Image (spheres, rainbow, N blue to C red):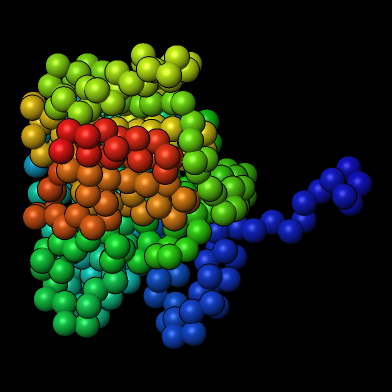
Amino acid sequence: AGREEVNTNIVSLTRFLTEEQSKVKEATGDFTLLCHALQFAFKSIAYYIRRASLINLNGLAGSSNTTGDDQKKLDVIGNDLFIAAMRGSGKCRMLVSEEEEKLITFFDSSPNARYAVACDPIDGSSNIDAGVSVGTIFSIIKLADNAKGSAEDLLMPGTELVASGFTMYGASAQLVITMKGGSVNGFTLDTSLGEFILTHPDMRIPRTRSIYSVNEGNSKYWEEPVKEYIESLKYPKDGGKPYSARYIGSMVADAYRTLLYGGIFAYPADKKTVKGKLRILYECAPMAMVFENAGGKAVNSKMQRMLEVVPEHIHDRSGIFLGSADEVQKVIDIHKKHG
Ligand code: AHG
Ligand code: MN
Ligand code: MN
Ligand code: MN
């Protein structure tokens, strides 16, 4: 290939983080080092997920977690890899994981660390034995100077997150990350280089798209406004074309498609799961931050801005509508009609 075909100006995640750090004059480099530990966790989880069926890592671990989910072997491995990477970074003081009932504190190894991380080590794990794309979701919190080192330090609205994102382990490993008030950037893991390469700079979600993503198996339990909203997509009153249904059942995969194509993802609170199923700290808030920074919207089942919802405990749940600004607005308008 001639010079014009070969892209020699490759932006790796490492270079991206260095450039981001140079924009923050009081930066100490701690956040950058924390992100390097995060990317190592994603690379190691990707490695084990790709080999799971070869080394008998599919199936159940035989335990369940505090939110009542049966733990898959990969839930436990992903959790252990993530904890080790965060502890080893020396930059993380506390860690919330879906797979850990209690908050993990790294007082012994990093008492002065100023960041806390909340994570869903393997999201979509119920599908993992079927080879469906799963992912890791994370939120990064910068602790206040007077942080006590307990869970209360983390029970804050998503607007306070300094960064969030996810890695989807699909055909390739896709990392999407955003900083507070910043843009959304997507990276693809180049396994031969062992580097995440910037492939989707400044991701913007389309304002509208006729795709909806919800588990219709819960229709029986939905509140009236939700039923009316979904019906309006399937039987459009204005005689327009009905929406397409796309539901993978793995939030990271459904969210990544929605971010790229547009549309709406919904996991409403309903009569069966009154608080909703998805967890605020490591599913709803990080995803809401990514979508808002990409020009989208995210609200809970009370039509409150998702990023303003304060979790009552580290595994607190919420209903969520997440996606293109105009699609989420349709949900809000229908709920307003119901008063
Ligand atoms: P996790 O695998 O981390 O427990 O999360 C599962 C979540 C989320 O990934 C997905 O959107 C949702 O559960 C699917 O729930 P249903 O199977 O009830 O549709
Ligand atoms: Mn789970
Ligand atoms: Mn999850
Ligand atoms: Mn999970």
Residue at 15% of width from left, 62% of height from top?
A: 155
Percent x, y of residue 33: 43, 69
Q: Quadrant of the N terminus?
A: top right
Q: Is residue 223 visible?
A: yes
Q: In the displayed image of the protein, which residue is found farthest to the bottom?
A: 26
Q: Is residue 232 above or below residue 207?
A: above
User: With 149 as the anchor, is 256 left or right in this view?
Assistant: right
Percent x, y of residue 170: 47, 32
Q: Is residue 84 visible?
A: no
The number of callouts visible is 0
User: With 17 as the anchor, is 155 left or right in this view?
Assistant: left
Q: Is residue 38 above or below residue 162?
A: above
Q: Nearer the viewer, residue 71 or 10?
A: 10
Q: Quadrant of ligand 1?
A: top left
Q: Nearer the viewer, residue 54 or 77?
A: 77
Residue at 49% of width from left, 41% of height from top?
A: 207
Residue at 15% of width from left, 38% of height from top?
A: 339
